[in-house]
Image (tube, rainbow, N blue to C red):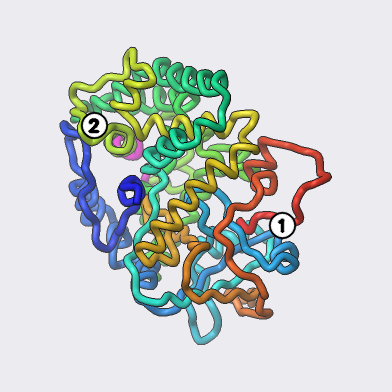
Amino acid sequence: MNPEWEYAHTDHTAPRQRPAPAGLAHTEAHWRHHLHHQAPNGALMGRGNAMLDTLTGGGPLHLMHTTAALDAIRSSGQVLGAAGCLVGALYCAPLTPTAAGLRPHNLGSYLMETKGHRDVVVIEITPPAAAPAEGVDYLRLGGIHLDTYHEHRHALTGAEDERLRAAVVRRVQGSAGFLDLMLANACGTATDPAEFLDRLSHAIAAVPFLGYLYFEVVSEYLMLHSASAETRACADLGEMNNYLYKRLAFAAVPTMDRLFDLALFRPGHRRLTDLLSRIEPALAEQAPVYVRSRLSHLFAATALDAGRDVRTTTFHGARFDELAAIAPRLLGQLLFRELRTHPRYPQLFPLIEQAKAHGAYAYWNGRRITAPYNGFLPKGEVGVNLATPARVTLWTAEACERGLLHPQERIDAALHPRLADLHGTALGKASFTRPAEGRPALQPAH
């Protein structure tokens, strides 16, 4: 088993200290302790989180999934996955059984409100045994991306591979000053937060991975520090408030409804404080300081090789092989994004992305994980392991006036550990086109 899969997974109920480069001002354990005990909603990072309690309980799991492909699922008898933050798992939200019906997690309620054109599927999973509550942290998948590139370079021509490598190096060299600034902040330097955010906004265009970090850090800040009545109501149910980051994303990037691409999340200082003032005014002032410190730490921790010393590392002048030694996981993230814009990505997609999905399925089955979740935070984004040996049953569902879901018709379909065709996904529709003739009938379930 590739050790990068273990590195990329987090168990918030029993956190472990991952290897990290030397010289960081704070450890991963320090940040966890700080957030758990100092943030108003910090208890939701662990045993106070209802989703985590359910995942570790060993009993049946109830999840909801929205789909525009119910007819295709019925006719084919297959439920397929889609590449994304859950690496091929079927994207769902938790459901809680009550006497009156299945109550959606607030993420599920959001999906039902905003995806009214889609059908809702209720999924019941009966795990063979209790399992750890491990979630895959897509911010830590850089090593998997890099290993997958090395394993499948042969699919590229020599000229394509050379252009790919050169493009990645140009991105790093053009942003080296800011990348080094983040390393300095991770070691304890306190750059002016307004300047930091403005430079971050500029750097994301060259290093899209920074947009992922930026969005998740701001989302974390909002969910853990919000004191609104809405957030308190969610916390009373053991849930993080997903409405906060959804509002942030769609206000910051007008095209998010077409493709949820976090490389486009790049507000500068003034824009960020304005966005947060509209969502929860009391949180706007301190956000830039939080983002500067937290993002700098996460960048160093997720980008650099654990054997490095952050204090003596620089990106200036680094070539491809040097990047592979200095910051292999950053290199992997950059290669992943570069390949996503490659003209032949639709052809490469089944080879590259299915390989990652197979690796994830193998890890999850080895750990008896039937429902991995977005492991950066246990906010409610949970998936179904499509290769699980657990008993899985699917129903159509309807919502009552109270917003509760009620299973209706049993769906005669089975999970298949395979990714749907790229052209039926949001990324494929937004970025790639092809003639309608020959397009497979089955569209992705995510």
Q: Position of residue 31 (x, y in %)?
A: 23, 46
Q: Which mark is residue 186?
A: 2
Callout 1 environment at 10 Å: few (<14), some (14 to 19), or many (20+)?
many
Count of numbered labels shown in the rendering: 2
From the viewer's side, name the closer residue of 361 and 218: 361
Q: Does the magenta portion include 277?
A: no
Magenta region: 283-289
From the viewer's side, name the closer residue of 385 and 115: 385
Q: Position of residue 104 (x, y in %)?
A: 52, 70
> In front: mark 2 or mark 1?
1
Q: Examine the rendered structure and indicate whether residue 417 appears above or below residue 61.
A: above
Q: Residue furthest bottom?
A: 99
From the viewer's side, name the closer residue of 211 and 443: 443
Q: Which residue is mark 1?
A: 442
From the viewer's side, name the closer residue of 298 and 16: 16
Q: Position of residue 209 (x, y in %)?
A: 44, 34
> Which quarter of the picture shows residue 346?
top right
Q: Amino acid at mark 2?
A: Ala
Circle 1: element type: loop
Quadrant containing the C terminus in the rendered view: bottom right
Q: How far apart are the two marked residues, 2 and 1, measured between alpha carbons? A: 47 Å
